[in-house]
Every structure is written in structure tokens, then in C-alpha cells.
Amino acid sequence: MNIREILYRLVQVQSDTGSVKENDMAQCIYGIIKEDEYFRKNPELCGMYHNDDFLGRAAVWALRRGTTDKTIVLSGHYDAVEIESYGTLKSYALNPDELKEKLNDFSLHDDAKNDLKDSDWLFGRGTCDMKAGIAIDIDCVLEQINSEVNVLFVGVHDEENLSAGMRQSTRLLSELKHKYNLDYKLVVITEPHGRKGPDTFKISLGSVGKIMPLIVVKGKIAHSSDVMEGLNSTAIMAEIISNMELNPHLCSTDRNMTTPPPTVLYARDMKETYDVSIPEYSSVFFNYQFLKSKTPEKIIEEVKDMCLNSMKTVIDKYNKAYDILNENYSLKGNNKRSYNPLVYKFEEIEKIASENNDNYITLKKELIDNINTLVRNNEISMQDAGILIVKRIIELSAITEPVAVIGIIPPYYPAVNNSYLSNNNEIFENTIEKVLSEHYGLKLEKESYFMGISDGSYTSCTNRKGEEEVMSNMVTSKEIYDIPFDYVENISAPVIVLGPWGKEYHTIYERVYMPDVEKTVPELIRKLINTI
């Protein structure tokens, strides 16, 4: 079976991320592997790894043994985004040949129109992101490339959602390492790449970090007619947003790359119905990307400072408004409130709540059990769970004054870059550059970080203290979201994001460049295997 045939089999199976459909994809991949003669003779060297996933999803793995401990890991995700966006073409989304025919009847932009006429481009959901990469990985593990080197394939689920597959697979990689005495020299993630032009080829030597700070603000409730008796939580939230949204000073720069600034993903008050009282609680969370030059501890402290300054600003505004109103209009029946800006990290507010309640452990367990049930039943999102947990902990703290609490909610992606690893070997990127130049006339474009967020974040750990700071402020429980940094630390291998050229992922024009799928990327991986 060649790569194209493998790819067509994979694409035909719908594998919507965050759904049980991913199980069908895992079975398909495992079926292809078991058809191979090597794995029929060595069934113990492949399998489906289950690790308490709430949808029963599994990582699919296959290990072609070498005579030494030298090992390359080939990994990719087999989930894809939904097909609803195809509209009337939905029934063709998983059939590349028929889809290409049907798209001819549509009005397309010029680039898509040109690629539609070009047999080098394959259209369809998942062709690019990233079943082409999975097909390449499978092809490489089914082939005897170098008898000395172990080739380990790991196909994971849920990358488009919370990366549950790769987080769970860190345990698998750790177990296989000890069982077969493997020395992980390199991890290759076959995610697709975008190009500036047809004469270039891009790889990434790390992966950007992503953290999601959640801020839950408690104000002072009051009737809107007596607004000077309270403090509006939404005003504090709005000031925090104003200070953080698109703030260039919060970007991080490393090795000629800079992250986008933080941006709000969710912001609202927490009133469930309309009434004329000012909102007591409001919540906001941000998408905050970072590189290795900025530690997660630093980010949490930055957010804490922003919240503190924001609360001071709103309190100052309240004080000035009160003084002006009282001086000019002689406020009656309103007493000026004295507010102190209170800001806590989640671990700090938990300590206060624990000291305030003798039965805190029982109360917390009841809360978490109820929240986890709602998440597992898909009644609330992981992010909603975080908001509800923080609000309840604030209530248990018995703090009556306005307060802002900072927690971290899923997903969390650590920043990784090969330059920070003691076992980094530049021979890998040099090999890629040489093959591209000599065999394909392509110029290599090297990125220090894959900026699209990837499972590469879980291939090494060089700042255990910082990661523990994040996890100690992770609001959700370990039962529904955890990153096992013991296992991540045990892997600690350089990562290269090396995949085929693709365009317009997640849209109806998603497509992949087949010469990369069938020739360029497989040859590069073979050369890397022979270089290890």
C-alpha cells in the first residue's frame, strides 16, 4: 500500500475532534498497521493505548525495532475539524476526487481555482491537517529504513481541542522507553506548513507556548439607584481588558520571533437573569502566547500586576466620582466606601478558603465531583468549569470586599525550543537543508517556533518549577485535565515540525501538496532516520 492509498483510507473516515468519531479513525489506523507483515509477526510491537479518556479514545502506536537504542518518534494527530462548513458539499468532504469535481461548479478565489486545476493538489477535510502527515508516518514505520534505528509511530487524538491524546501519550512514550530501552534522539511532528513561495520549505524547531489566564472579579453588589454603595465588577473586568488586550509589552520575543499580544476569548458578567443590581461577579479569560524567553511564572505575575493596577484605577474613579458628587450635590443616604485593591492567585485564595472552613476538603470534593460530572456529560465546557470553581472558592473564602482572582484554565501548552536542550543536535536541520537544496532545489526556511500551537509542547521540559507554578494555579481538577510533567521530562527530546505544504486548513478549500506527501517529506524523514 502506497502513501496515497493510505491517505485516501484515512480521509474517508470522519474523525471530528472532541467526539467518539475519533475512535473510528484510531481503528482504521490500527487496522492498516496490523495488515503489515512485520507487525503481523510482531503483534506486541503495536497497539491502541487507552488511558482513562472520557470518550474512550486511544493513541495508536507501532514500534519497528532496531538493533541499537537510538530512536526516532514520528507523531501526528488523527482528529480533524467538522465537515458542516462544506454545506451542500458535505457529503463529498471526505472523498477528495468527487469533491474536486464538485468544486469546479463553485465560484472560487484565484489561488484555489488554480490549485483545483493542478493534479498536485488534493482537496478534502483532513487531507492537510493532518491525515497526510499521519499517512507519511505510517508509511515510514512500515518500511525497513535503517536496521539499527528504532522507529516509533504515535498517532494521537484531540489535538484540535485540548491535546488530550498527546498529554496521555507522554505516559506511553515513557513506558515504551523503559520497556525497550529506547533513547529518544528526535521527535518529528508531521504537521503541515505554509509557504511564502513554491521555492521554499519551512520547518519549525520548537513550538509556541499558550496559557489561558482566567480572572474572576467579585465587586460589591448594590441597587443601580444606589450605585455609590457598591462597586461594579464589570467595570473592573473592563479595565483589566483595556490593560491587557493587544498590549505589545506583554509579547515575548526569542530567536527572531515574536508572539501576538494577548487577546480576550471570553468576557461577561455572571448574572443569570436581568435585575437592576450592578453585577457582583464578572469573568474574563485571555489567549496568551509566549516563547521560552518568558517563563510562565513571569506571565502570572504580569497578569497579577495588571489586575492590581486595574482595581486601583476603578477604585480611584469611584473615589473621585463620590467626592465630586458629594461636593456638588450633597449625596444623601450614601456613605463613601473604603476599598482596598485585593488580587490573589488561585492557590492563594484556596489557602484563605481552607483556613476559613474546617470542612474545606469535603466542600471542595463535592464541588469538583459535581463540576466534573457536568464536563463529562458535555453540559458545560472545561472553561465554564473553571469559572464556576473560582466563583465558589471566592464564596468559601468569605471575603466581602471586591477582589480579583487569577487562575489558569485548560488548555495549557508549554513553550519548547531545541536550543534550550542539552541533547539538541543541529545535524538534523543541516541534513534537511542539504536534501532540499540538492534534490529539490528548495530553500529551507527555519522557524524557531511553530506558531500554530502543537503537540510539540509536550516533548520536553526544561523549567519544571515554572510548570509546577502553572499547575498549582490550574483551576480544574487533575481528573479532567492534567499534564504529567514527570513523563514529559522523561522524554525530553528535540522536536522538528516537518510536514507537507498545505493551504486553508479548516475551510472548505483545505488542500495538501501531494509531491510533498509522496516524495519530499518521506525522503527527509528517511534521511533523518539514517542520520541518527
Image (cartoon, rainbow, N blue to C red):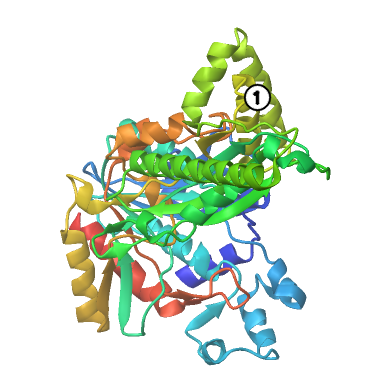
Q: Is 480 or 519 nearer to us in this picture?
A: 480
- Does 197 appear above or below 507? below
Q: Residue 118: percent from the left, percent from the top?
A: 50, 90
- Quadrant location, the C terminus: bottom left
Is residue 223 shown left or right of residue 420?
A: right
- Does 483 appear above or below 397? below
**Residue 158 in view of the camera:** no
**Residue 52 in view of the camera:** yes
Q: Secondary structure at mark 1?
A: helix
Residue at 38 percent of width and 45 percent of height: 414
Q: Residue 160: percent from the left, percent from the top?
A: 55, 55
Toward the top, the furthest residue is: 358
- Rate crowding at label 1 as few (under 14), some (14 to 19) or many (20 or more) other CA atoms within 10 Å: few
Q: Is 258 or 169 nearer to us in this picture?
A: 258
Q: Is 371 or 90 nearer to us in this picture?
A: 371
Image label count: 1
Residue ID for mark 1:
395
Residue at 70 percent of width and 91 percent of height: 105
Is residue 282 shown left or right of residue 465?
A: right
Q: Residue 168: percent from the left, percent from the top?
A: 48, 38
- Does 253 appear above or below 344? below
Q: Amino acid at mark 1?
A: Glu
Quadrant of residue 56 within the rendered picture: top right
Is residue 263 shown left or right of residue 151?
A: right
Residue at 32 percent of width and 75 percent of height: 201
